Amino acid sequence: MERRRSRNRTMSQINVVPFIDVMLVLLVIFMATAPMIQTSQVELPSVGKASAVPAQPIEITVLTDGRLRVRDREREASERGYADVDALMPWLRERLKASPDHPVVIAADQRTPYGKVMAVMDALQREQVARIGLLARQRSN
């Protein structure tokens, strides 16, 4: 009876021959295609020194009471004062006729109401000023 039991046992072996065949085929494929792969070179842009000096922006300072002060460092050394945005716009239109892409920055104190700053920005956008920015001071630690 012991002979019957040994005959009915299943053999548990892993057949690795198909696995080796597949690996050899893949190796041949990679070896054949590797020389055909072209390495690409990326042409990075080079940065040179700027030929033109960047323009000094026109600074519009919004005071807490809503009055405006304008400083144009390229043309004038002193500041101009204006009662409101409507009084400022004719001067600004005339100034931006010569260079429409001239930057304009808005500065305001912490105590200045946000609505007054937004009114100036809205007026500049209605005049289609291309480059508008907000002037900020860095905190000193």
Image: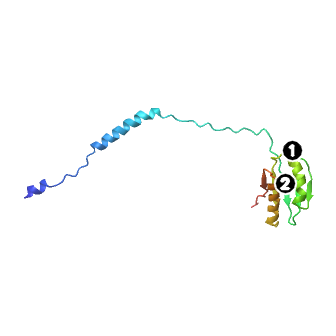
Residue 124: quadrant of the picture: bottom right
List the residue tagged with mark 1: 98
- Tell me which label, 1 or 2, sits earlier in the chain: 2
Note whether residue 35 is visible. Answer: yes
Task: Give the spatial CA distance, label 1 vs label 2.
Answer: 17 Å
Callout 1 amino acid: Ala
Question: What secondary structure is found at the residue carrying circle 2?
Answer: strand
Note whether residue 73 is visible. Answer: no
For the N terminus, the quadrant is bottom left
Q: Residue furthest left?
A: 1
Residue 54: quadrant of the picture: top right
Residue 105: x %, y % from top left: 81, 54
List the residue tagged with mark 2: 59
Residue 74: x %, y % from top left: 87, 47
Callout 2 amino acid: Glu
Residue 45: x %, y % from top left: 66, 38
Residue 119: quadrant of the picture: bottom right
Question: From what the image shows, is residue 34 above or below residue 132?
Answer: above
Q: Nearer the viewer, residue 120 or 23?
A: 120
Residue that appears at 78% across and 54% down: 133
Q: Residue furthest front?
A: 126
For the C terminus, the quadrant is bottom right
Residue that appears at 48% across and 35% down: 37
Task: Tell me if 135 is positioned left or right of 15 in this view.
Answer: right
Residue that appears at 81% across and 55% down: 126
